[in-house]
Amino acid sequence: MGIKNKDTKDYPSTELLNAFLDNELCAEDRHEIHEILERNASLKKETCELNTIKQLVREAYPEPQAVAEGSRHNWHSSAHKSWTIAASVVLGILVASVWNSVAHRNASETHAQATEQAAAISQAPIVSSKRIVFDLNTADVDSINEMFGEIEYLMNQPSVDGAEYEIHVIAHGEGLSLLQADSSPHPELIRDIRARYDNVTFAACYNTINRLQHEQGIAIKLLPGIIVIDSGVAEVIRRQQSGWAYIRV
Amino acid sequence: MKKLSLILIPLAALLLTPFAAHAGGYAKQKVVYHVNYDNPKRQAGAMRNIQNHINAVGAENLDLKVIMHGKGVSLLKTANTDENFKSKVVSLKSQDINFNVCANTLRGKKINYETDLYDVTEEDIVPSGVAELARLQAEGYSYIKP
């Protein structure tokens, strides 16, 4: 992905883009970045990807409440920035040294910490061996064929204790082409699997669909019966959090 | 700011030194590595990842299995002929790392594990790579695809 325009004036720093996405910029700066993004398609795409990652991180780790109101700064004031960095380094060292001395001094406290950690782990979702998410992010023919082989095998396993396999295929990025009406290498197979097994579902990532529609200027058509989800990666995380086993195709 | 960093960075290094000594302080881990690709560089990288994982956590704290299926089975095929691959596999096995192979793959690709693959016994064969990956996750193993 080569960004042609490396001119610093027209190429905002990563920090600035992050501040933009975090809604930390003042009005003029926001406006300026909007204009730069309109001029530079690949940068716009990168910014969209960065935003997706940020959303996922927010979803996975809820933000702490105590963010001071005054944190919306003007990024032109570099003195402010250096003092913030200096202050956080000092704070980091203080926290580290306090934590350090506590950990060394008191073995039982270390033990308490371990117990706390174990408690946190026990709160993790109970993963079922019968519900499997396939994360499909590739158009590699062999990998896709193998995935179908695995699906057939799993669906033909006799059910133990009445529990049958449930499979959810999440197609995003290059993986989307499998579910596209005009490019899928296996439209019949997908129709056939859907007809035979109620427990197998195929989902397409809207972020990918949207990006391709912008890039190619054409409407993306999916095979019949495909679920559209907001974001492939977010869906993977949601499924894992509700106890689905994960396989990267 | 520069002067400040000159003071702060060594100070930070000094304070953080005891952490380095405690680097091995991981709790026990259960991990499954998934290999279903035949790129030898990527496979060698996976084995390097595993060795680094052992070094960080300590073999005594680690229950680590490698599940190979589809094209990934080629790792043990290569180990049969390539000394470099073989020594890596031997070394990992000596540290209690399990290498498991998918029975579906052996059947589908008509592979005789006794002659075609390096050091595989019946105990190393699992009925299905994917079902085994799901079963292990249900038992609390973390999934890594290097």
Image: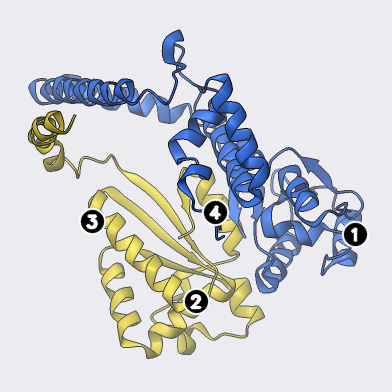
Chain colours: A blue, B yellow
Q: Which mark is residue A136?
A: none
Chain ID at mark 3: B
Q: Are marks 1 and 3 in contact (CB under 8 Å)?
A: no
The answer to whether A248 appears left or right of A12 in the picture is: right
Chain ID at mark 4: A
Estimate the spatial distance between the alpha carbons at disc 2 and disc 3, rounded to whole Å.
24 Å
Q: Amino acid at mark 2?
A: Asn
The answer to whether B90 appears left or right of A4 in the picture is: left
Residue B112 in percent (x, y) is at 54, 86
Residue at 46% across / 9% down in the picture?
Answer: A69
Q: Which residue is mark 4?
A: A5
If you read the primary sequence from the N terminus, does the residue marked by circle 2 or circle 3 appear first? Answer: 2
**Are there few (<14), some (14-19), or many (20+) residues within 10 Å of tag 1?**
few
Q: Is residue A242 visible?
A: no
Please say if B30 is above or below A57.
Answer: below
Residue at 45% across / 71% down in the picture?
Answer: B42
Estimate the spatial distance between the alpha carbons at disc 3 and disc 4, rounded to whole Å.
43 Å
Are the residues flagged by discs 2 and 4 from a single subunit? no
SS type, badge 4: loop
